Image (tube, helix red, strand yellow):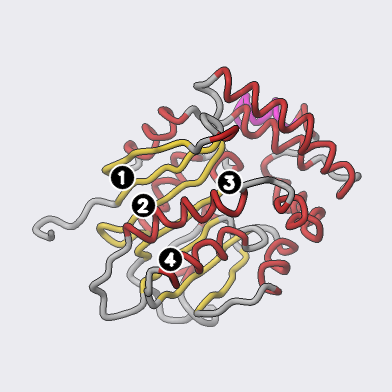
Amino acid sequence: MTPSTAASSRTTGVDLDAVPDAFDGVASTYDLMVALNPGYHAHLRASADVLVAALPRDLDRPVRVADLGCGSGASTAALEAALRDAGLDYELLGVDGSAGMLAQARRKPWRGAVRFLQGNAETLTPASLAPGAPGGAPVEGYDGVFAAYLFRNVDARDRLLAQVRDLLVPGGSLVVHEYSVEESRSGRVKWDVVCWGVVVPLGLLTAPRSSIYRYLWRSVVDFDGAERFRSRMVAAGLEQVRSRTFGGWQKDVLHTFHGRRPRAAGTA
């Protein structure tokens, strides 16, 4: 555990190893909480659109997309809507460490080839994400990987980025949808005000025994700045790395990061 994550644990009572269990405890009310966040679903859809726009259109099979840290399925729903609006055939996999959150995700109405898997994002391989039952035929890799609100909950971020790179086919894209306020004083102030004025009080109403929403505040405060995270992506072997922030109160608070696995030599 790094010094920052140790501080987070002391401040909130939740350490990184316990995050999935902590989300189990709020799974039944989590969708209500995010519904009270103006723009939450629209922002997820905007980042999902970035990933879908980068997916190949000339495949003789459905595009394969993995949603890491899918939680209760809000990010998965954004991806499915974006894929359908783009007219793409797809195989969409949601992965999360919390059994409770996955139970909520599975209850939602899915229109296409969507499945869910409980697992630790840091230990995934293409074979472990094979379609069908365990032991099914492994896939070559994923055309796109989406990760919303995942990386700040991971201590070994560089290792996870390298593993995600290996999950991608050559030319495949990673899109990360994440809060980051380290580089912006105004962003940090806005985050503190929103968390302590809205998120934490609402969390106390919907899940009074849980400290997960205090952990949410601290996890963002401790997370990389946008430049630092882009540097991690480059160091992990991704190229064409870029990021953008959102407008409104989310400016310099919420970001979309995008990078690609390099194509094989001699390919377009």
Rounded to the nearest angstrom, the CA distance separating label 4 from label 1 is: 17 Å
Label 1 element class: loop
Find the distance from the CA under tag 3 to the CA under tag 2.
18 Å
Give the secondary structure at mark 4: strand
Q: Is residue 4 magenta?
A: yes
Q: Amino acid at mark 3?
A: Tyr
- Choose the circle earlier in sequence order: 4 or 1: 4
Whether tag 1 and tag 2 are in contact, CB under 8 A, the answer is yes
Image location of residue 239, percent across then percent down:
27, 43
Q: Earlier in the sequence, mark 2 or mark 4?
A: 4
Q: Residue 16: image x %, image y %? A: 67, 41
Q: Quarter of the image containing the N terminus? A: top right
Towards the viewer: 225 or 232: 225
In the picture, residue 72 is in which quadrant?
Answer: bottom right
Residue at image mark 4: 65
Disc 3 or 2, which lies upstream in sequence?
3
**Amino acid type, residue under disc 4 in the picture:** Val
Find the magenta span and give its range: 1-9
Look at discs 3 and 2 and give the one toward the viewer.
3
Q: Nearer the viewer, residue 101 or 264?
A: 101
Which residue is labeled 3 in the image?
149
Q: Which residue is identified by label 1?
A: 238
Quarter of the image for residue 237 reads: top left
CB atoms of marks 4 and 1 within 8 Å: no
Q: Earlier in the sequence, mark 3 or mark 1?
A: 3
Q: Nearer the viewer, residue 89 or 95?
A: 89
Which residue lies under the disc numbered 2? 165
